[in-house]
Image (cartoon, helix red, strand yellow):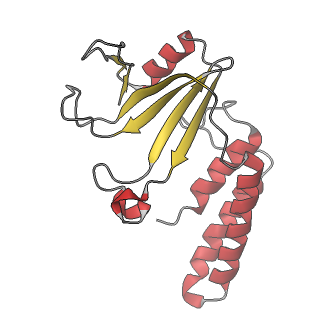
């Protein structure tokens, strides 16, 4: 992963790699007084295939925008797997290109943690009920019930490098672990 800085206006080839991994990128942005980080997802049906299929192809799938909020403005980065032909970046890496500087904050179109947790719980209850009705799916009912228990637990116990202790609110921690527990493939 490379984080690529903005072009200097009027100077061709002036973009540069700001950081070669996520930790260095976040350290760089912390030094820029970033107050909040937001991820934005935009579906991209341009290839005529469902997103779950087109993601496997270069240039296919949806786009992730990373917004770094400062006081009243934001900088926007776009995730792109393959840079344009004329660029000299490592084409095997994902790159985050700086595409917007000092923009207004992007609208928050995603569900709140509470709303997402409620929606996941509802779907898990439906899936567990459906699985219980079919003998050959009863093992899935157990899986979905475990996910519900994880989602509703008052103190999620797991912690690792993905979920460091104290990095997320209890509700967010429950949502992430509940999502992991509900994964079936």
Q: Residue at the location (64% across, 29% down)?
A: 105
Hey, which quadrant is residue 10 in on the image? Answer: top left
Q: Is residue 113 above or below residue 136?
A: above
Indicate the quadrant containing the N terminus: top left, top right, bottom left or bottom right. top left
Horizontal side of residue 140 vs 149, given as left or right: left
Residue lying at 24% horizontally and 17% vertically, measured from the top left: 13
Q: Is residue 42 above or below residue 52?
A: above
Provide residue 128's location: percent of width, then percent of height.
Answer: 67, 75
Question: Observer-nearest residue: 159 or 90?
Answer: 90
Residue 32 vs residue 43, the one in the foreground: 43
* x, y percent for residue 130: 66, 82
> Is residue 156 among the parts visible in the rendering?
no
In this picture, is 140 found above or below 96? below
Expressed as whole percent of the image width and height from the top left, the position of residue 145 reads 69, 68
* Residue drawn at point x = 60 percent, y = 58 percent: 181
Q: In the figure, 103 relative to 43: above or below? A: above
Q: Quadrant of residue 126?
A: bottom right
Number of numbered callouts drawn = 0
Measuring from the top left, give residue 131's x and y in whole percent.
Answer: 63, 81
The residue lying at 75 percent from left, 41 percent from top is: 170
Residue lying farthest front?
10
* Residue 93 can be seen, yes or no: yes
């Amino acid at each position: 992963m490379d984080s690529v800085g903005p072009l200097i206006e009027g100077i061709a080839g002036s973009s540069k790699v700001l950081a070669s991994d996520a930790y260095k990128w976040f350290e760089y942005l912390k030094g820029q007084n970033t107050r909040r980080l937001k991820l934005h997802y935009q579906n991209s049906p341009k290839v005529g295939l469902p997103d779950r299929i087109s993601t496997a192809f270069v240039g296919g799938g949806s786009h992730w925008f990373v917004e770094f909020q400062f006081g009243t403005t934001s900088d926007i980065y776009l995730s792109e797997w393959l840079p344009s032909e004329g660029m000299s970046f490592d084409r095997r890496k994902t790159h985050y290109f700086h595409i917007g500087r000092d923009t207004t904050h992007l609208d928050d179109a995603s569900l709140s943690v509470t709303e997402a947790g409620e929606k996941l719980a509802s779907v898990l209850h439906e899936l567990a009920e459906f699985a219980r009705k079919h003998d050959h799916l009863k093992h899935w009912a157990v899986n979905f019930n475990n996910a519900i228990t994880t989602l509703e637990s008052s103190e999620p116990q797991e912690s690792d490098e993905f979920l460091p202790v104290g990095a997320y609110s209890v509700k967010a921690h429950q949502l992430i672990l509940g999502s992991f527990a509900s994964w079936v493939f």
